[in-house]
Amino acid sequence: MDPQLLTRMMAQMGITPAELAGIMSQFDPSALSSGPAAMQDFLRGVPAFSESGAVAPRNGPPPLSFMSTPEDIKNYKAWFENDSKKPPVPGPTVPRELLVADQERLRREQEEESLEEGYMQTRFTVIGFPKHSCKRQLHQLKPINCSDMLMRKTHLGSYLLCRSIAPCTKVVAIQTVVEDVNGDVRTLSIYNFPTAYEALLDYVDLLFPIGVTMAILEPTYKAATQGPNAIIRVDSPTDIVFLDPRDEVLHGARWKSGSRVYRFNAWPSDADHWKARGNDYFKAVHWLPAVFAYSHGLRCEPESLVLRLNRSEGYLRLKFYSAACADAHHVRCAAGVAEAHRGKALFREAKAEYGRERYQTAKTLFEQWWSSHPKDTDVVDWITRCNQRLQECSTGTYDWTQLFKQSQTGPYLDIAGYTGPIEVKQMPNRGGGRGVAATRDIQTGDLLLVAKPFSFASAAELQSSVLQMTMNMLTSRMDRRTQSANVACAVAKIYGNPDLHDHVFHLYAGPDYPPPPSTHPPCPDSDSPVELDPLQPSHRIDIARLESICTHNCFGVMSLRPGGFKSQGSEAFGDSDDTPIGLYPLASLFNHSCAPNSSYTFIGNIMVVRAVRAMKLGEEVTLSYMPSDLPYFQRRETLERGWHMTDECDCRLCIDDRADGEDNLRRREEIAAASHKQLYSKPLSELRSLERKLSATYATTRGPHRPALFSIHQSIAENLLASCTESRALQAIQENIKALECLGWTIKDSKTGSRTSHRSQVRKGPELAVDPSRLGSSPKEVIGPMLRIAQIYVFCHDMTNAKKWLKTAQWVFNATVGGGNDLFMLVERPTLERFELLDTVSQIL
């Protein structure tokens, strides 16, 4: 295009040559087909370009995709860290008309794309880098204008008074255009706002309508990693204060562009109209916008009990139980409150206390309601549920079979948590300085913990039309989609339940943060709920720290399913995009051991921890952060990358592995990796050869605990069974027993299995085939091999040993999961049917 023609066109839009040059300078000329020289020649043709004072073109980050290699991620991280070291500079000035027009274009594009059949949205974001969250209140800050802000700087001690002047868009962040009182405009990007993680545009418009006035606390102004325009980035929802004309901050404010924003629907002017708007939002199932509307109404009429009562119901729907409880309690105890309102407040407070897991208080409130409403049958159910929860949390008694059945239709189960004979203790030699210890002698199978997640995210609840790519700078890896969603869930829960803040923020946050307190959970300042004003929240959420806490403390949730257990392998620990993720604060305080003395199972999203060997009073209780069958160097790399554990692990397995020697460890890993695929289809001769090669990598002085050989022996057993002869079947028993011994299981009776004849096994026949005082590794994964041994004994007409191994399999299941015979039969039914053991088990168990 002719430069003079372009200049005239821009002049008609009110854009000066200097402003045009500033806009053009934001683009990387090398990205243009005509090349950088042509771009520079073009810009020189624009009058007054050399006097524009525009900043030099910036170089963006290297591109990433779903196919990016670790080297690509390393380069991105290096660019990010290098860019953060550059000094602050004035940001480019973009004309109001262009910025708004561009935002409106993006909005139209998103609306059109959302209507396309089969449309798939791709999202990319970065977490785990330093980012600011304000710790002060609005009244402690001083105003700043856009023109005074510098790019690559967080403006500590200041707040930006601004209002939205364009419709929102939504990819990862909510994005809009705001102006300050002088009419200067900037792009505003808002991350981690409650209820907005996968929100549709129409819903986002209710949260951030055109004309909404805000104070951004200690704003960060930075270059965008995507797109040409610099942005004001807000990471914490508590860094936004929503304002209305009554707020003191707006007294004396004069907007240069006029008192009202174009297309702004004026705010209601009184409490009744705000209540009506809130009720409309509530009926449309827009809980947070309804809560915002009721809160604006309370600004107009602070003593309105109806508005506070309505807001408490909105908070209940959002699971903001602390906020709901505070509002309902305020109404219930208010002087002169109407009896009808007091009754509603009582019932809502009771439900909120139930949500806060204060079951005795909830029960008392429900009983108060029942005394004045004896015909209400719903409250009887609530009281029954309270009694059940009180029984569960005090005794650890659960209907495991019923819970398992419920978990097959959804992960959320209505139960109380339980803490068994364990406590958090100071352990200076451990990462984070603390751990979990036994408060009494513990037996194998004892229930140690039943934990509900603080936050939880599963792919089934996320939109299937979205491909999310999140680079985690803390691990230099791509996070799963559910990991990102779980952070959003944690933000929302803390936002709506301020009293739970320390339950999460007292967890280990990695080496860049101070060590956490020595005890957990934190002692509350009081049992009273904390009131929440969503327009100006007083508590603070440090997003960078929360991202680090979730990175270091979350669990992959592999729920129990019929047909047995999925392996706690790579999918359970972060390599499957569909794996649900949960944050379990107390469970995250268990320190790691590759050979732990406890194990966990998930029923729905409920975490159940049981002892896998006997422990003494005061002994540390450990869990494994990864599969125990991983090779030594992979375990070390995983611990170092994921949890910064650079010291050598002192568990028995790692000590034994190191004693084998580094060369043997490398060789073992190579052999196992090369032979892993289609192991069961390999001929017997090849399997025997692999057995010899792997055995040669273990020191001759090492005991039978040799995990790398487990799958080999299992494969040999299956190969032998294919011949359908009794002699080969008995050899298969021996191979399966060897497989169990390779995982550290102690077979009771030295004459059993490979060490005795078939006839002597029949004569001996102890009730259990393994030492019950100490389970080997992977206890849930050996149930299949144990049932296979029982099946072979049935084939050989040896019902004594068949019964022994069936009882052993059932006992191991009960010791690691619980639930007795009923749950065992439910979970293992497909395996029992496949092995034709169903009738036999029914008779024996």
Image (spheres, helix red, strand yellow):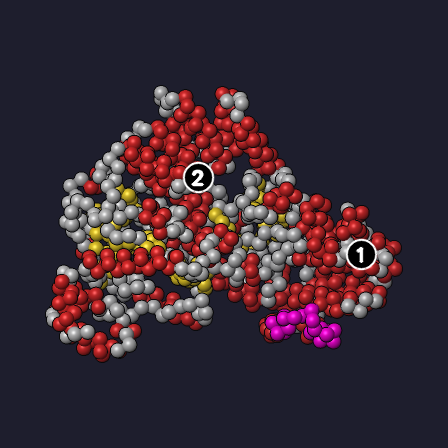
Residue 681 among magenta residues: yes
**The residue stretch that appears in magenta:** 671-690
Residue 557 screen position, x and y as percent: 55, 53
Badge 2: few (under 14), some or many (20 or more) residues near its Cα, within 10 Å?
A: some
Q: Which residue lies at the image location 37% right of the left edge and 24% below the top edge?
A: 334
Instruction: Kindly identify the amino acid type of the residue bearing the numbered disc 1.
Output: Asp
Which residue matches tag 2?
317
Q: Are marks 2 and 1 in contact (CB under 8 Å)?
A: no
Q: Is residue 731 above or below residue 142?
A: below
Q: Say which quarter of the image contains residue 708.
A: bottom right
Q: Which residue lies at the image location 26% right of the left edge and 53% below the top edge?
A: 166
Element under disc 2: helix
Badge 1: few (under 14), some or many (20 or more) residues near its Cα, within 10 Å?
A: some
Which residue matches tag 1?
749
Instruction: Kindly identify the amino acid type of the residue bearing the numbered disc 2.
Output: Arg
Q: Which residue lies at the image location 44% right of the left edge and 39% below the top edge?
A: 317
Q: Say which quarter of the image contains residue 316.
A: top left
Residue 446 screen position, x and y as percent: 65, 45
